[in-house]
Image (cartoon, rainbow, N blue to C red):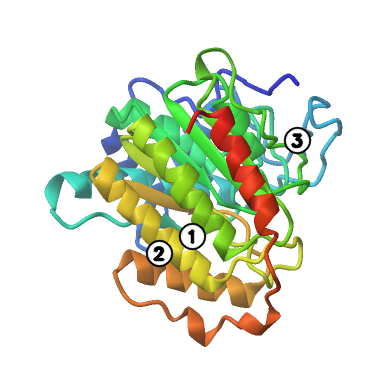
Amino acid sequence: MQKDTGKAVGLVPNDLKPGDMQEGNKDFVGELSVTIMDARKLCYFFYGKTESLDPKTTILVPEDRYGLHAIDTLDPDMTFQESLIAAGAGISLVDSVVAASKKSQDQPVGSALIRPPGHHAIPKGPMGFRVFGNVAIAAHYAQRVHGLKCVFIIDFDIHHGNGTNDAFYEDPDIFFLSTHQDGSYPGTGKFDEVGQGDGEGTTLNLPLPGGSGDIAIRNMFDEVIVPCAQRFKPDIILVSAGYDAHVLNPLASLQFTTGTYYMLASNIQQLAKDLCGGRYVFFLEGGYNLDSLSYSIADSFRAFLGEPSLASQFDNPAILYEEPVNKVEQAIKRVKHIHSL
């Protein structure tokens, strides 16, 4: 099936430097100073345009491989401006993490708690309540501005990150790895989607069967994510951190727990320390149960800071059921065979 591989996705102007982020009108997200002017420039490049993008226009996803005209992502003034801030927050964090990795022996910690998220946005427009590909923009920014050639992207949202997948489908220098529930929105992310052309082999999709939980993701991390990252040798790791695979999430049927997310945050942090000088940035994606979302994000931060997990105060083992261990093992075996792991 033909991929939506718009060549201009996330491209950063060659003359853009980190210092440029200090100019122009600023908005503030926590302690992050985000320059709207430069975020706007980056997002125009994400759409493959250099002219003004009208924020009052409802942008329709073309009828392409998704087989629909998506009108689920409206783009009024407020959403447009917030989307620029979200994209700008990501690239500001990349700046901060890279700078910190050069100045201190303490490993930098970066996590963008942003809305709207981005991994469904495709080169031709918004999709799935996402407007700009925050991770896609940050990946190209890390390459063009900071010279970090090899970018490893991990996406553990319950839904396939089709936008990020498509953005780098032919790019050998950006490895996109997604684990998601099989058959979930938007119906992409099959085993055989591995990249094409120069990028063949640098896209890995592992759709998990419903009911998969902590055991499944632990085994996948050890058997798939770690060897892929070790072989790829990244200069930075970017993470599409979706918390909607939690067992309390109302929109799907995986069984991650708050403890699962603590494990993922801790293990990814260690992977970054081992492979790329501790450089990594988390980007918030999905999460639709506010209680599980808040507890899981807080526990991820405890992992980043080296503090013990408090997942036991929230997680309820009694609501979990037996995982489909055999199906998970077959899925992991299949993806390992496809990618020669």
Instruction: Measure how far apart labels 3 and 2 are at the Cα level.
Output: 30 Å
* Quarter residue 270 falls in: bottom left
> How many other residues sit within 10 Å of disc 3, few (<14), some (14-19) or many (≥20)?
many
Find numbered disc 3 in the image and state the secondary structure of the residue it sits on. Answer: loop
The reply to whether discs 1 and 3 touch (Cβ–Cβ < 8 Å) is no
Q: Identify the residue under disc 1.
A: 113
Q: Identify the residue under disc 3.
A: 59
Instruction: Measure how far apart labels 1 and 2 are at the Cα level.
Output: 10 Å
Q: Nearer the viewer, residue 117 or 203?
A: 203
The reply to whether discs 3 and 2 touch (Cβ–Cβ < 8 Å) is no
Eye-nearest disc, 1 or 2: 1
Please tell me which of labels 1 and 2 falls first in the chain.
2
Instruction: Measure how far apart labels 1 and 3 are at the Cα level.
Output: 25 Å
Q: Amino acid at mark 3?
A: Ile
> How many other residues sit within 10 Å of disc 2, few (<14), some (14-19) or many (≥20)?
few
Horizontal and vertical percent position of residue 52: 60, 28
The reply to whether discs 1 and 2 touch (Cβ–Cβ < 8 Å) is yes
Residue located 47% across and 51% down the image: 221
Residue located 61% across and 83% down the image: 316
Please tell me which of labels 1 and 3 falls first in the chain.
3
